């Protein structure tokens, strides 16, 4: 029974944030282009929400968007970090 407890490691919140960042950075390093701009359509498909809700999300001040002309979007890297923080982890 002691051998099972030796393999268990308790992670405090500071270490968990670091672990999440490492996981995201490893994932982003594997992507060909992590700075692809996602549209409302891409966001609606990923979050399984309607297109109008995705547009509303892009308008929120706490959602890190970028503007290109009149279009709003979000880079894939920023979106993944936002999503990770929003859900409390991957």
Image: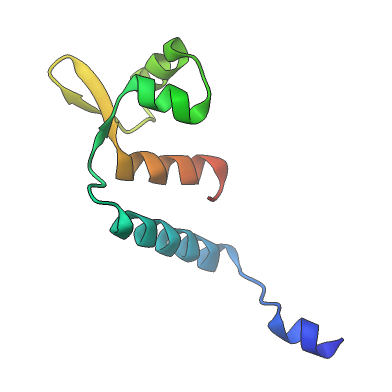
Residue 87 position (above or below residue 52): below
Residue placed farthest to the left in the image?
69
Q: Is residue 61 above or below residue 26?
A: above
Q: How is the image coloured?
A: rainbow
Image position of 42 (left or right of 53): left
In the rendering, at what x and y percent does residue 18 appear?
Answer: 45, 65
Image quadrant in which the N terminus is located: bottom right
Q: Is residue 45 above or below residue 78?
A: above
Count of numbered tags: 0
Question: Which residue occupies the extreme top position in the image?
Answer: 52
Q: Residue furthest bottom?
A: 2
Q: Position of residue 17 (x, y in %)?
A: 49, 60
Q: Nearer the viewer, residue 46 or 12?
A: 46
Depth order, front residue of 79/28:
28
Q: Quadrant of residue 79?
A: top left
Residue visible at 42% across and 41% down? 82
The answer to whether 35 appears left or right of 62 in the picture is left
Task: Name the residue: 37% across, 26% down.
Answer: 42
Q: Residue furthest right?
A: 1
Tell me which residue sits at (46%, 30%) in the image.
46
Residue found 35% across the figure and 18% down from its top: 59
Residue 84 picture location, percent across and down: 48, 46
Placement of 42 over or under 79, stated as above or below? above
Q: Nearer the viewer, residue 33 or 16?
A: 33
């Amino acid at each position: 029974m002691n051998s099972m407890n030796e393999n268990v490691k308790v992670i405090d919140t500071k270490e968990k944030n670091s672990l999440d960042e490492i996981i995201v950075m490893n994932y982003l390093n594997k992507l060909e282009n992590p700075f692809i701009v996602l549209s409302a359509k891409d966001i609606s498909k990923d979050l399984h929400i309607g297109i109008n809700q995705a547009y509303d999300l892009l308008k929120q001040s706490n959602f890190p968007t970028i503007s290109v002309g009149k279009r709003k979007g979000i880079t894939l890297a920023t979106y993944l970090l936002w999503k990770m923080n929003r859900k409390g982890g991957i």
